[in-house]
């Protein structure tokens, strides 16, 4: 990445779908917010952003159309820093500043919004963490020698590799297509549709519950989601509504860096999809938990992940697919996404895990919020999860007029004895 | 400690305005300072700088007013001279018509400058009227309806497409010449079709094909050079498969 010749790179395997399906509503923009205990000092923040821009030069790119594929090209515009008073996760337009990330500030909150074309949850959190490191260094709270080596070094070429391609293995059978999953029946709200409900709960309270059942927090939340969806279907049936697809499936993104070593900051995650089939009858919460637990263990097996990578990267490498002009390719991807991809799951639970920072920095931070990209018209709702110290934050992204699922989800947790606080965020 | 009243972030004590949203820290202080700045600025500039302080809108208005005066003068002077010398409206009808059409055209551009379609449509109607009037003056042989107005339509459509392409093209360079060449090729084809229909009753494009064959390769070369130079040295990024 030299200044003499502008840097460009093809999109990574996971990002290839996003330009074809993104729109003003379905923006494919993900957001991570940090809520500080004190007001943001704007002078120090600007300095911190300057350092972060330099540390992550591969994010300073714009999306360009090639003849066969989209690609990313170096863009030297300054990063957009705005007051955070609008709707979250708004689309990036192609006019003026063509960068695909922005920073938003309001009182004691700093948010970063990234197009999913650039990175996944891991890259997003690393970027925000870097801003925080530099910010607190500017404020004199963290000393240079206390900084992680990562933040004091220049970027490594591995940080912008397409790791899917590195770990692609040929001649592996593809995954078998799955039947359609249930979708929530709620009608869509008026544009702009995306609305977020943020709920705060105690990690220790939830952890105790999960430990009692011998599962992880993610397993527990996915099970709650499935249980709530099952209760929605039961009520629909009571009201004599016809429910076409009775398979409930939750998409759970998995950070592949935990399986395959890579320092990439671009997309490198895949999905595991625990499911229950209501054609077989009603499930108790414990039964759902058992299924989720085993499915999560089984599907994160390296060999099975290889299978999914093989399908995704395999189709990208297919000569016929490669030779189709971009416009046609985008059309095919769009229709394939809505006719197959979006039909596969009834909900999404994205857990970025627990953010870990040095003690001196942690004392200055209240909590984090991850807002997953606005769900598509079929999915209608998704859930982001992130933890910090003892605070776990759930954010429900919703494009419908109904808050029924969120209500049932939170009521379930409260009934289990977990205290939940709804935040004005 | 200073806080921005709009975005709520903490500001340095010496900051007058929030660097994030541009809001003044204290409106009163900022207002006074702004007034002070303006007074100092006007004192420094003095009365000689009056002209430079004319805004773009004022300049446009001045231009329109001046044009209207010139056109009105043109109309009245030529009409009066013609009337006084020949006792009737003879040659002056040409100058009067031209000045009138020009005045209305300038007004359309002035008032509808931000409404491209309306501006072009208004201008097209006026030019068509001009052609019809000229046709009427010249023994009414009907060329305006069958030749002039259709050709004018093609020219205006080409201008519209060209402006739209310019607006949607990010980098302006020799690519615009390339687009212009392509547009002129298509334009000449359209003109030949209209001429063939008028003179021969059948359509057989000849010379316009030569124009297209000549200009399209040049246009493609210009577009190639432009986009290749703009995208760096590698064509691989555009054609990577």
Image: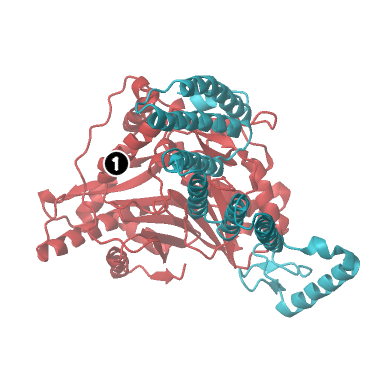
Query: Residue A201 is drawn in which quadrant?
Result: bottom left
Q: Is residue A180 left or right of residue B156?
A: left
Q: Which residue is mark 1?
A: A341
Q: Is residue A318 left or right of residue A4?
A: left
Q: Residue at x 52, y 49 (%)?
A: B130
Query: Residue A156 is drawn in which quadrant?
Result: top right
Query: What chain is colored red?
Result: A
In front of the other: B236 or A365: B236
Q: Position of residue B136 (x, y in %)?
A: 48, 47
Q: Say if residue A357 shows up in the picture.
A: no
Q: Residue at x 15, y 64 (%)?
A: A235
Q: Position of residue A87 (x, y in %)?
A: 47, 62
Query: Residue B5 is drawn in which quadrant?
Result: bottom right
Q: Residue at x 41, y 71 (%)?
A: A421
Q: Secondary structure at mark 1?
A: helix
| Chain B representation colour | cyan
Quadrant where the image shows the C terminus of chain B: top left
Quadrant where the image shows the N terminus of chain B: bottom right
Q: Position of residue B105 (x, y in %)?
A: 58, 54
């Amino acid at each position: 990445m030299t200044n003499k010749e502008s840097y460009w790179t093809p999109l990574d395997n996971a990002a290839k779908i996003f330009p074809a399906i993104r729109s003003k509503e379905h923006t494919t923009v993900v957001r991570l917010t940090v809520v500080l205990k004190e007001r943001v000092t704007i002078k120090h923040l600007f300095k911190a952003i300057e350092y972060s821009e330099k540390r992550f030069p591969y994010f300073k790119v714009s999306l360009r159309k090639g003849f066969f594929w989209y690609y990313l090209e170096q863009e030297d515009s300054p990063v957009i820093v705005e007051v955070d008073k609008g709707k979250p996760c708004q689309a990036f337009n192609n006019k003026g500043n063509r960068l695909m990330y922005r920073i938003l500030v309001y009182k004691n909150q700093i948010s970063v919004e990234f197009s999913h074309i650039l990175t996944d949850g891991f890259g997003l959190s690393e970027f925000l963490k870097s801003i925080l490191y530099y910010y607190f260094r500017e404020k004199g709270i963290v000393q240079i020698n206390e900084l992680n080596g990562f933040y004091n070094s220049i970027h490594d070429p591995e940080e912008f590799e397409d790791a899917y391609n590195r770990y692609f293995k040929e001649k592996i059978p593809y995954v078998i297509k799955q039947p359609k999953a249930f979708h929530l029946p709620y009608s869509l709200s008026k544009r702009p549709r995306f609305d977020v409900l943020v709920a705060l709960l105690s990690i220790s309270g939830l952890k105790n519950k999960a430990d009692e059942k011998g599962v992880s927090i993610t397993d527990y939340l996915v099970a709650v989601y499935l249980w709530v969806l099952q209760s929605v279907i039961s009520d629909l049936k009571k009201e004599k509504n016809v429910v076409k697809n009775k398979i409930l499936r939750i998409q759970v993104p998995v950070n592949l860096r935990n399986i395959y070593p890579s320092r990439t900051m671009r997309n490198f995650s895949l999905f595991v999809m625990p499911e229950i089939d209501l054609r077989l009858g009603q499930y108790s919460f414990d039964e759902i938990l058992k299924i989720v637990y085993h499915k999560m263990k089984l599907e994160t097996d390296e060999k099975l992940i290889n299978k999914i990578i093989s399908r995704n990267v395999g189709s990208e490498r297919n000569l016929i697919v490669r030779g189709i002009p971009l416009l046609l390719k985008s059309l095919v991807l769009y229709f394939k996404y809505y006719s197959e991809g979006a039909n596969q799951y009834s909900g999404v639970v994205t857990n970025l895990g627990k953010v870990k920072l040095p003690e001196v920095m942690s004392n200055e931070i209240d909590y984090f919020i991850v807002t997953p990209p606005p769900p598509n018209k079929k999915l209608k709702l998704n859930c982001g999860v992130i933890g910090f110290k003892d605070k776990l934050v759930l954010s429900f992204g919703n494009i419908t007029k109904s808050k029924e699922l969120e209500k049932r989800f939170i009521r379930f947790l409260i009934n289990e004895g977990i205290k939940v606080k709804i935040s004005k965020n | 400690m200073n806080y921005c009243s709009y975005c709520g972030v903490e500001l340095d004590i010496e900051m007058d305005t929030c660097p994030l949203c541009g809001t003044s820290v204290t409106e009163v202080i900022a207002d006074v300072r702004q007034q002070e700045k303006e007074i100092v600025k006007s004192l420094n500039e003095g009365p000689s700088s009056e002209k430079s302080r004319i805004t773009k809108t004022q300049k446009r208005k001045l231009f329109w007013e001046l044009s209207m005066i010139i056109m009105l003068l043109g109309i009245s002077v030529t009409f009066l001279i013609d009337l006084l010398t020949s006792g009737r409206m003879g040659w002056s009808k040409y100058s009067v018509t031209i000045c009138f059409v020009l005045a209305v055209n300038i007004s359309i551009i002035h008032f509808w400058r931000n409404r491209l379609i309306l501006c072009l449509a208004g201008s097209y109607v006026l030019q068509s009227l001009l052609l019809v009037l000229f046709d009427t003056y010249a023994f009414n042989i009907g060329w305006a309806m069958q030749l002039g107005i259709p050709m004018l339509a093609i020219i205006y459509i080409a201008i519209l497409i060209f402006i739209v392409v310019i607006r949607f093209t990010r980098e302006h360079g020799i690519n615009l010449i390339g687009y212009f060449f392509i547009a002129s090729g298509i334009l000449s084809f359209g003109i030949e079709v209209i001429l063939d229909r008028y003179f021969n009753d059948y359509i057989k494009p000849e010379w316009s094909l030569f124009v297209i064959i000549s200009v399209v390769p040049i246009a493609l070369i210009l577009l190639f050079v432009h986009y290749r130079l703009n995208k760096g040295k590698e064509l691989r990024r555009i054609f990577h498969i």
